[in-house]
Amino acid sequence: MKIYTVGFTKKSAKVFFEDLLAPSGARRVLDIRARPSSQLSGFAKVSKSGGDFQFLLSRLCDMDYVHVPELAPSDRLLSEYRADELSWDAYSEQYIEGLGEQRVEDDLDQGIFDGGVLLCSEASPEHCHRRLAAEYLQRHWDDVEIIHL
């Protein structure tokens, strides 16, 4: 199973859709942001009624869109990290503990993850929960390969 990851900040729509997603071989975007409809999301802003982001994914990349809030960090955790109340290491540890407590690996549909792209806002995976989520799933599911776009 291949699980891809990507962030949209510091990228143009052209780079994001044409250079990263379209040639990747991925089949769907799995949005693991807590608030995908935030105004700060730019071209990756999502609408429940089928917004521009979903349209562009379909048209430019032939990809589906699925929101997976189970992998989003909690509001408290995200707020504390953004306010510099938590180090990256503490944030990572608490995020992983939360996934473990929820046993997300048991409740998520593995079928949608094969060929799925975990999406969040961070430009690179080093300090991003998409990497943590992918690595967590890799530890709990069989034969997971992670590809950071």
Image (cartoon, helix red, strand yellow):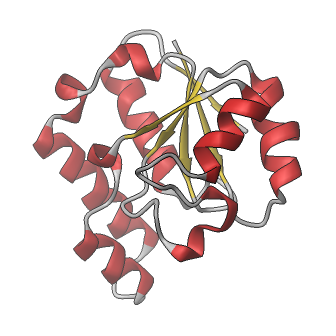
- Front position in the image: 85 or 34: 34
- Front position in the image: 29 or 104: 29
- Up the image or down, 68 lies above or below 72; here it is above
- Up the image or down, 74 lies above or below 142; here it is below
**Quadrant that contains the C terminus:** top right
The residue under the point 59% across, 67% down is 41
Image check: 73 left or right of 3?
Answer: left
Image check: 51 left or right of 93?
Answer: right
Question: Residue 55: percent from the left, percent from the top?
Answer: 65, 41
Question: Residue 72: percent from the left, percent from the top?
Answer: 34, 54
Q: Is residue 86 visible?
A: no
- Front position in the image: 50 or 97: 50
The residue under the point 30% across, 56% down is 95
Q: How many marks?
A: 0
The image quarter containing residue 99 is: top left
Question: Residue 69: percent from the left, percent from the top?
Answer: 31, 48
The residue under the point 40% across, 89% down is 83
Q: Is residue 114 visible?
A: yes
Image check: 31 left or right of 62?
Answer: left
The image quarter containing residue 107 is: top left
Question: Residue 89: percent from the left, percent from the top?
Answer: 40, 65
Q: Residue furthest left?
A: 101
The image quarter containing residue 42 is: bottom right
The residue under the point 48% across, 71% down is 38
